Image: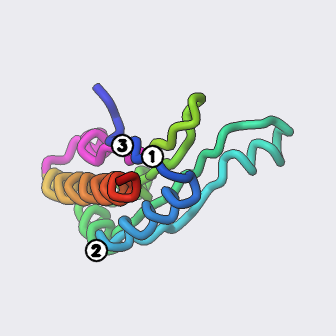
Amino acid sequence: MSYTLSVRPGGDFDEVVSATMDALEAEGFGVLCDIDVQATLAEKLDVDFRRYRILGACNPGLAHDGLTTEPELGALLPCNVVVHETDAGEVVVSAVDPDRLVGMADNPALDDIATDVHDRFERVLGTVEDEFESAEV
């Protein structure tokens, strides 16, 4: 079973990152951290790695609801959204599957929150995919 929701929107890497951030914002998520894995690995290990960004996304209202229900949930936040290139040069956008993530807490009171985040991430990925499908026409 997969632990991510993913699309391969096509398009330029930097444009996909920007579109992903915009789509997250439209769904109420802020990007709390933006980790450039390629740059970090080059600096720390002096290795070449494909373009790879980890966006730590958080919807404050949903995070508050989740943390109020399950204080230890903070260990699973923020929800990561990844934009990376494959070995073939394709751009992939993946978001953690909130149903799987929240399932680790084993608290049914979080199910509605997980469903809400899941639906929002599906819309984010759909928006990014649609933006680049439209650009190809």
Q: CA distance from mark 2 to mark 1?
A: 32 Å
Q: Quadrant of the C terminus?
A: bottom left
Magenta-span inclusion, residue 12: no
Residue bearing the label numbered 1 = 10
Q: Is residue 130 above or below residue 32?
A: above
Q: CA distance from mark 1 to mark 3?
A: 9 Å
Instruction: Kindly identify the residue that appears in the image at 33 percent across and 57 percent down.
Output: 134
Residue bearing the label numbered 3 = 7
Q: Is residue 75 left or right of 36 when viewed as pictured?
A: left
Q: Is residue 25 above or below residue 91?
A: below
Query: The disc labelled 3 sits on which kind of residue?
Result: Val
Q: Is residue 41 above or below residue 2?
A: below
Residue sticking out furthest to the front:
137
Colouring rule applied to residues = rainbow
Please tell me how crowded label 2 is: few (under 14), some (14-19), or many (20+) other residues with Cα within 10 Å.
Answer: few
Q: Are marks 3 and 2 in contact (CB under 8 Å)?
A: no
Please tell me how crowded label 3 is: few (under 14), some (14-19), or many (20+) other residues with Cα within 10 Å.
Answer: some
Disc 1 or disc 3, which is closer to the eye? Answer: 1
Counting from the top left corner in percent of width and height, residue 42 is at: 80, 44
Q: Is residue 70 visible?
A: no
Disc 2 or disc 1, which is closer to the eye? Answer: 1
Query: The disc labelled 1 sits on which kind of residue?
Result: Gly
